[in-house]
């Protein structure tokens, strides 16, 4: 039984896209298919190396990793607008009981990563998705001096918008992808 995980993100400077790529590696290492897609921009030209997501791809996924940069402790407007456009899926219950998790990037250590991850979880909860994060059994959560939270993978770019992920950030993102894929596979196998 093939399991498909949608790694959906919006990225302005590339750090969230870098996290998405690492999450996709973890998904694939767990034996699932990773579909990396981006959220359509509201104003600027689309310049991502990944395709723009369709609502159909969202409804057909078995699990979801959702990423956005931090903007004043919240997801970017483009990501919020995308979720505001998913009412038809909500009305049909298309995402109910599917595993999901969130990831983000900020410019500073105290730039709002955790509040952003929590606020990004709200539309997923309204859709009835099952949220997962990163357990403290992951050693990198104890040692990271950059990004990484129990709420989901994160990156701290610093004020120079550095998109290079630290080793801890990479490991946490890959581990998160594996965990999300394994949970999705288990739930899909036991679905009635």
Image: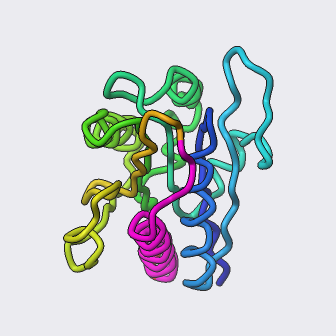
Residue 182: x, y in percent?
Answer: 46, 80
The part of the image, by quadrant, that contains residue 112 is top left
Magenta span contains residue 168: yes
Q: Is residue 111 magenta?
A: no
**Looking at this view, is 20 or 55 the one in front?**
20
Tell me what residue is drawn at x 31 percent, y 33 percent: 111
Question: Which stretch is magenta?
Answer: 162-189
Quadrant assignment for the N terminus: bottom right
Query: On the rendered structure, is 22 left or right of 151?
Result: right
Q: Quadrant for residue 12, please give it.
A: top right
The residue most toward the front is: 160
In this rendering, position of residue 141 left or right of residue 116: left
16 sits left or right of 133 in the view: right
Above-or-below relation of 75 to 8: above
Q: Nearer the viewer, residue 90 or 101?
A: 101
Seen from this angle, which residue lies furthest top? 43
**Where 28 falls versus 89 (above or below)?**
below
Where residue 167 sits: x, y (%)? 45, 70
**On the rendered structure, is 37 left or right of 51?**
left
Q: Residue at x 43, y 30 (%)?
A: 75
How far from the left and from the top, in percent, is residue 8?
60, 48
Q: Residue at x 70, y 30 (%)?
A: 40
Q: Determine which quarter of the picture holds residue 9.
A: top right
Residue 133 in the image: state x and y as whole percent.
31, 61
Please name the residue shown 48% across and 44% down the image: 93
**Numbered-mark total:** 0
């Amino acid at each position: 039984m093939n399991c498909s995980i949608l790694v959906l993100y919006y990225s302005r400077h590339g750090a969230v896209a870098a996290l998405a790529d690492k999450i996709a590696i973890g998904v694939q290492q767990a034996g699932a298919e990773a579909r990396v897609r981006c959220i359509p921009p509201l104003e600027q030209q689309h310049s991502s190396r990944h395709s723009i997501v369709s609502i159909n791809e969202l409804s057909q996924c078995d699990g979801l990793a959702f990423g956005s940069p931090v903007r004043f402790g919240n997801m970017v407007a483009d990501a919020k607008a995308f979720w505001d456009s998913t009412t038809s899926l909500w009305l049909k219950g298309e995402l109910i009981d599917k595993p999901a998790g969130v990831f983000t990037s900020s410019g500073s250590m105290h730039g709002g990563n955790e509040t952003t991850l929590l606020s990004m979880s709200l539309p997923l909860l309204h859709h009835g998705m099952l949220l997962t994060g990163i357990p403290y059994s992951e050693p990198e959560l104890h040692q990271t001096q950059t990004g990484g939270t129990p709420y989901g993978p994160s990156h701290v770019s610093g004020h120079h918008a550095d998109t290079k992920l630290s080793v801890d950030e990479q490991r946490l993102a890959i581990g998160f992808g594996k965990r999300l894929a394994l949970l999705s596979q288990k739930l899909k196998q036991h679905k009635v």
